[in-house]
Amino acid sequence: MNIEHCKIIELPKINDPRGNLTFIEANRHIPFDIKRVYYLYDVPGGAKRGGHAHKELHQFIIAMSGSFDVLLDDGKDKKRVHLNRSYYGLYVCPMIWRELDNFSSGSVCMVLASHEYDEADYFRDYAKFMRARWKA
């Protein structure tokens, strides 16, 4: 897969004067079953997160509060995506290197994942990722 497969998905937003509501349904709003949910918070200013790729894992990244950038890299093309609304999310397919940076104060990044945690699914070294990317 390449960077064109990664895309912003607008989620349903139900407006209500008492507070808005957004929901996500697996295989309806995002193209996978949800096996794990995790979130990043209290990220210090200037810090970067991510810096890896997954062999099989699909992810959906949402700025639940505040904002941050996601840098996507498929080994050929790069794209920076700014997330700052809780009713938009970024679908990231397997074999895409991702880095998160530019976190605003108080931001919360929630990630929905297609698989449970498995260290064997990670590429944490960019050179190894690039070698595997060009074998495919």
Image: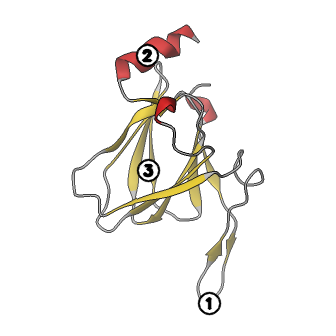
Q: Residue furthest right?
A: 28
**Pointer 3 with pointer 1, Cβ within 8 A:** no
Q: Quadrant of the N terminus?
A: top right
- The residue shown at (65%, 57%) is 10
**Pointer 1 with pointer 2, Cβ within 8 A:** no
Helix, strand or loop for disc 1: loop
Q: Earlier in the sequence, mark 3 or mark 2?
A: 3
Q: Residue furthest bottom?
A: 18
Q: Which residue is mark 1?
A: 17
Nearest the camera: 104 or 38?
38
Q: Quadrant of the C terminus?
A: top right
| Callout 3 amino acid | His
| Callout 1 amino acid | Pro
What percent of the width, then of the height, locates residue 54?
51, 32
Q: How is the image coloured?
A: secondary structure
Cα distance in 3D space between marks 3 and 2: 24 Å
Quarter of image, res 78: top left
Cα distance in 3D space between marks 1 and 2: 49 Å
Q: Which mark is residue 82?
A: 3
Cα distance in 3D space between marks 3 and 1: 27 Å
Q: Is residue 100 left or right of residue 34?
A: left
Residue density around tag 1, few if under 14, some if 14–19, many if 20 or more, within 10 Å: few
Q: Which mark is residue 134?
A: none
Residue density around tag 2, few if under 14, some if 14–19, many if 20 or more, within 10 Å: some
Residue density around tag 3, few if under 14, some if 14–19, many if 20 or more, within 10 Å: some
**Looking at the image, residue 33 lies above or below residue 3:** below
| Callout 2 amino acid | Met
Q: Is residue 53 left or right of residue 32?
A: left
Q: Nearer the viewer, mark 3 or mark 2?
A: 2
Q: Which mark is residue 130?
A: 2
